[in-house]
Image (cartoon, rainbow, N blue to C red):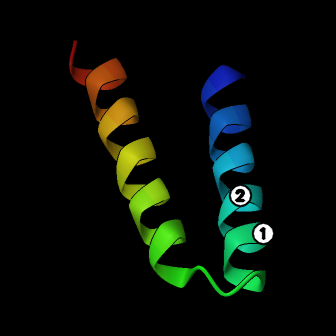
Amino acid sequence: MRIRRVLGGAGLAALATGGAGGGWLAVVLMGLVGAILGGLFHG
């Protein structure tokens, strides 16, 4: 499943950035992924 893989990758990236002290970056990344997934589902 493609969407599940994207979500998994986003989760890993969020964990990596959070571990590196870039919490705000993880939030931005999740926002981006949410926008992309929203675009996939709505259009």
Q: CA distance from mark 1 to mark 2?
A: 5 Å
Q: Are marks 1 and 2 in contact (CB under 8 Å)?
A: yes
For badge 1, the amino acid type reads: Ala
Q: Which residue is mark 2?
A: 13
- Would residue 8 appear left or right of 42 to someone viewing this image? right
Q: Residue at x 54, y 82 (%)?
A: 23
Q: Residue at x 46, y 58 (%)?
A: 30
Residue 40 place in picture, x, y as percent? 35, 20
Please name whichever residue, 43 or 17, is drawn nearer the observer in this view of the structure: 17
Residue 5 vs 39, above or below: the answer is below
- Would residue 2 appear left or right of 41 to someone viewing this image? right
- Would residue 26 appear left or right of 9 to someone viewing this image? left
Residue 40 vs 30, above or below: the answer is above
Is the residue marked by circle 1 packed among few (<14), some (14-19), or many (20+) residues within 10 Å?
some
Q: Which residue is mark 1?
A: 16
Residue 1 place in picture, x, y as percent? 72, 22
- Would residue 20 appear left or right of 36 to someone viewing this image? right
Question: Secondary structure beneath disc 1?
Answer: helix
Please name whichever residue, 8 or 18, is drawn nearer the observer in this view of the structure: 18
Q: Residue at x 65, y 35 (%)?
A: 6
Please name whichever residue, 4 or 35, is drawn nearer the observer in this view of the structure: 35
For badge 2, the amino acid type reads: Ala
Is the residue marked by circle 2 packed among few (<14), some (14-19), or many (20+) residues within 10 Å?
some
Residue 35 - label:
none
Q: Residue at x 27, y 24 (%)?
A: 39
